[in-house]
Amino acid sequence: MPRAIADSGRIELRIDAAAKAKLARAAALQHIDLTAFILRAALPAAENVIERAERITLSERDSQRVLELLENPPPPNTKLRRAAAVFAKRSEKRQ
């Protein structure tokens, strides 16, 4: 189970001695400290995971369907009209 990240920005990592030695050796070969070595590898991987999770990839057919719906939206149904009315009331109260 992951531990909570403290405000100090410090992260604890449990690792066996052989793995730590391998990481330390690789870091030394690049003339950087272990933290920098791990961050160089981990941050791009994290960015990649986040980007894949946040991006929606559509097929050509689906892209055309989205564009068609944007250009020619269907008429609002009852549920949408009700939501718009609730939104309008809430917006009036804020002003």
Image: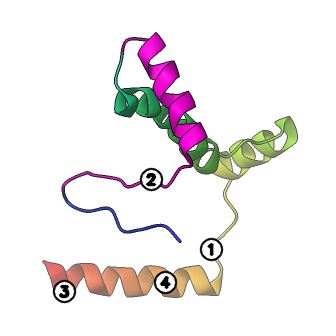
Label 3: which secondary element: helix
Nearest to viewer (mark 3 / mark 1) = 3
| For the residues bearing labels 4 and 2, Cβ distance under 8 angstroms | no
The earlier-in-sequence mark between 4 and 2 is 2
Alpha-carbon span between mark 4 and mark 3: 16 Å
Q: Which mark is residue 76?
A: 1
| For the residues bearing labels 2 and 3, Cβ distance under 8 angstroms | no
Residue 15 picture location, percent across and down = 53, 50
Amino acid carrying mark 2 in the image: Leu
Against 85, residue 31 (above or below) is above
Q: Which mark is residue 83?
A: 4
Nearest to viewer (mark 2 / mark 3) = 2
Residue under label 3, please give it: 93
Q: Is residue 38 left or right of residue 78?
A: left
Amino acid carrying mark 4 in the image: Ala
Residue under label 2, please give it: 13
Nearest to viewer (mark 4 / mark 2) = 2
Q: Residue at x 41, y 68 (%)?
A: 3
Alpha-carbon span between mark 2 and mark 3: 50 Å
Amino acid carrying mark 3 in the image: Lys
| Mark 2 Cα-neighbour bin, 10 Å: few <14, some 14–19, many ≥20 | few
The magenta segment = 8-31
